[in-house]
Each structure stands twice: as C-alpha cells, then as structure tokens.
Image (cartoon, rainbow, N blue to C red):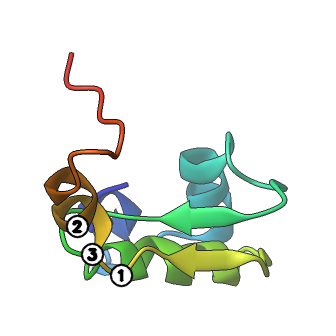
Amino acid sequence: MPAAFLVDREHNTVLDPEGLRARFEPALGAPRIITYCAGGIAAAASAFALTLLGERSVAIYDGSLNEWAADPEAPLVTA
C-alpha cells in the first residue's frame, strides 16, 4: 500500500480509523501481516497504520522487493 493512500490530503494527516480499515480490510485479522515495498522504508507507513488499527502481529520485510527479486530462487510473478 503506497503511503500516499494512507493520508487525508485535505487535512494532511493520517486517515481516520474508518479510512484505514477500508484500505486494509482484506488483511485485517490475519494471523500475521508482513508489509513490503521496494526497499522496506515505505512499508513502515503501512505497518504503522496497521498497528493504529490494533493489529499486533505486523512485520516489515526490511529488504523488501529489492532483496527478494535479487534471489533467483525466489518466486516472482511479473504478469
């Protein structure tokens, strides 16, 4: 989830809980949620938002797609 999707542009704040829930609905309540992005930095915004919603088993894949894609053994769907 791009961090820009978590911001209320009118007020320049993080979305309210209802807005965040709408964005993360498919993942809420999962046994474990791992956020990722290209390098792991932007994933922190998603992890932060998820913890604001009460999710406690949230992790950030620090190497994210940069690390994953560099491993020829790691599956990667490109289409």
Name the residue at 79% across, 81% down: 56
Percent across and percent down for residue 9 are 25, 66
Q: Which residue position is annotated with label 1? A: 62
Q: Residue at x 66, y 55 (%)?
A: 21
Q: Which residue is the site of mark 2?
A: 67
Amino acid type at image mark 1 = Asp
Identity, as a three-letter code, of the amino acid under mark 2: Glu
- Which quarter shows the N terminus? bottom left
The C terminus - image quarter: top left
Question: What residue is shown at x 35% (from left), y 81% (from top)?
Answer: 62
Q: In this view, does 71 lie to the left or right of 59?
A: left
Contact? badges 1 and 2 (CB < 8 Å): yes
Question: How far from the left and from the top, in percent, is residue 57?
Answer: 76, 77
Residue 34 placement, left or right of 66: right
Local crowd at mark 2 within 10 Å, few (<14), some, or many (≥20)? some
Relative to 14, is 59 on the left or the right? right
Q: Reply above or below: 8 against 27.
A: below
The dot on residue 30 is none
- Label 3 sits on what residue type? Ala
Q: Is residue 9 visible?
A: no
> Mark 2 vs mark 3: which is more N-terminal?
3
